[in-house]
Amino acid sequence: MPKRKTRKAIKKRITITKKGKAKAKKAFSGHLLTHKNRKRKRGLKQRAVLTKTESAKLRKMLT
């Protein structure tokens, strides 16, 4: 059986936690930040924990 290749784009964008959850950067934090309030921008800095189904799909892509 052939080896599976890692999807490099996914590897660069997400990290897998010790418990197997996937964490990724939140959307809407790249530009047009002047009208967003400070609390919202602080929240966008933190990495989001993805859902169980998304995490499973992404883990499959990484192996």
Image: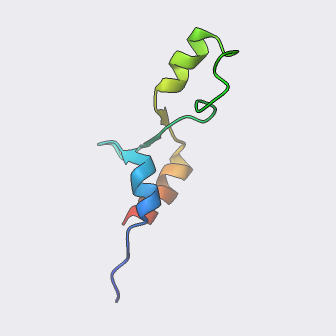
Q: Residue furthest left?
A: 18
* In the rendered image, the vertical position of residue 38 relative to residue 22, given as above or below: above
Where is residue 50? Give x, y as percent: 52, 41
- Given residues 24 and 19, the one toward you in this image is 24
User: Number of marks in the image?
Assistant: 0
Residue at point 33%, 42% (across, down) = 19
Where is residue 46? Give x, y as percent: 46, 26
| Colour setting | rainbow
Residue at point 35%, 87% (across, down) = 2
Horizontal side of residue 38 vs 19, given as left or right: right
* In the rendered image, the vertical position of residue 60 relative to residue 2, given as above or below: above
Name the image quarter holding the C terminus: bottom left
Horizontal side of residue 23 vs 38, given as left or right: left
* In the rendered image, the vertical position of residue 25 relative to residue 37, given as above or below: below
Residue at point 58%, 30% (across, down) = 29
- Given residues 59 and 24, the one toward you in this image is 24
- Given residues 30 and 63, the one toward you in this image is 30
Q: Residue furthest right?
A: 35
Quarter of the view holding residue 15: top left
Q: Residue furthest top?
A: 38
Where is residue 31? Give x, y as percent: 63, 30
Quarter of the view holding residue 6: bottom left
* In the rendered image, the vertical position of residue 31 relative to residue 18, given as above or below: above
Name the image quarter holding the N terminus: bottom left
Residue at point 41%, 43% (across, down) = 21
